[in-house]
Image: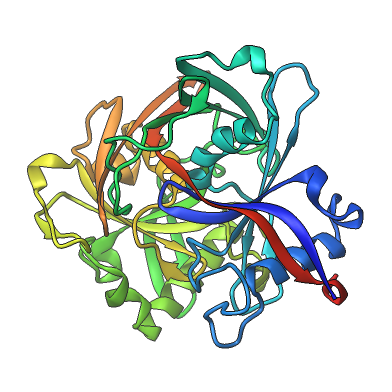
Amino acid sequence: MQTPIPATYMRGGTSKGTFFNLADLPEPCQVAGQARDLILLRVVGSPDPYGKQIDGLGNGSSSTSKVVIISPCTDGTHDVNYLFGQVAIDKAMIDWSGNCGNLTGAVGSFAIFNGLIDKAKIPENGICTVKIYQENIFKTIIAYVPIKDGAVVETGDFELDGVTFPASEIKIEFIDPVDDTGEMFPTGNLKDTLTVPDVGEFEVTMINAGIPTIFLYAHELGLSGTERQADINTNGEILAKLEKIRAYGAVKMGLIDDAKEAVSRQHTPKIAWVAPPTDYVASSGKTVKDDDIDLLVRAMSMGQLHHAMMGTASVAIGTAGTIVGTIVNDVAGGKALNEVTFGHPSGMLTVGGQSECVNGKWVARKVSMSRSARRLMTGQVWVPADSF
């Protein structure tokens, strides 16, 4: 027999995921633990040794192997709780250590659709401000959802590189986006030297903002910063090199004690490389001109080059890019900025950052960007009853 569970399949930014109202999950799956992980793995279709997730709602990529659980928040400050799970494709593992910035763009809309927002807060026409408590990283996110005739506006003319069709713009603010350690730069340095056995030494910026991220210069990796997915994801040698750098960087950031532990912590930290702006052809076929961007960025997600840019990594880029002295700011010109526009494999994105140095310690106040979101399917997802 199979168990039906109400669910919504949504696109948020350049990602897709299966969204659940916590109350709709079977009771044993409403709390953290094996039952919850097993049912969500089965929903997405993992683990799949074929890498396709044919028997689930995943699509064989890190951008679509995602689950979200939303619930009412009763702390008197936020409207809803948002819990994100990054589901491994070929392993029986869900990484709950970080947020998904792209799917964040869909949280406010989902909450309104599912009656989780006080009707008094929803205008007949205008903007509904949804205060979100991000449970993975214990942070506040504010979504500004457009409303017309009392309903969420999903279609529009806002274009987001990496998404084929235009939609309605949803503005997102990540408030105080540094992780729960409170240290934006975990070593206390804007730049560090990272030594990786049998690989080499690299100048890096390691930052906890949006999601823990390790930035490197593209040229130190033998890369240009204009790479597309096929250039990286079919190259076993560079994939192994990047993963080893990521593992040793995770140790230096204090996220794990031993590099071997990185195998079970694939979602964080992220690893990205940056380069000065240059003309290149995006995956859509359009040419991105160097005059339109401040820098080039390419980032890895779950062991593969992301097809565009993760929203949380965009927060890290916006934060590091607006702080003089980081690697990201260096390649963007080395001057004071309040926003950066970067080129990624699918096009470009602008992210605003507000940080300040207080008593020798950097503090991120806010990072802002625009996303879009759309419901793709609502109904029931069916899960074999013996799978959880």
Q: In the displayed structure, would residue 358 be above or below residue 203? A: above
Q: Is 353 left or right of 266, judged from the image as shown?
A: left
Q: How many marks?
A: 0
Instruction: Specify the farthest residue to the right.
Output: 28
Q: Is 205 left or right of 227, judged from the image as shown?
A: right
Q: Residue at x 33, y 37 (%)?
A: 321
Q: Is residue 97 visible?
A: no
The location of residue 75, given as percent across then percent down, is 79, 21
**Quarter of the image containing the C terminus?**
bottom right
Who is closer to the viewer here, 358 or 1? 1
Q: Is 146 left or right of 8, judged from the image as shown?
A: left
Give the image quarter of residue 235: bottom left
Q: Residue at x 61, y 14 (%)?
A: 121
Q: Residue at x 64, y 68 (%)?
A: 44
Who is closer to the viewer here, 105 or 25? 25
Q: Is 3 left or right of 166, judged from the image as shown?
A: right
Give the image quarter of residue 201: bottom left
Instruction: Specify the farthest residue to the bottom.
Output: 50
Who is closer to the viewer here, 242 or 281? 281
Q: Residue at x 86, y 50 (%)?
A: 31
**Quarter of the image containing the N terminus?**
bottom right
Instruction: Specify the farthest residue to the front.
Output: 149
The location of residue 193, given as percent across then percent down, is 42, 56
Q: In the displayed structure, would residue 50 be above or below residue 216? A: below
Q: In the displayed structure, would residue 175 be above or below residue 87? A: above
Q: In the displayed structure, would residue 187 be above or below residue 138? A: below
The location of residue 220, given as percent across then percent down, is 28, 65
The location of residue 378, given as percent across then percent down, is 60, 51
Q: Is residue 40 visible?
A: yes
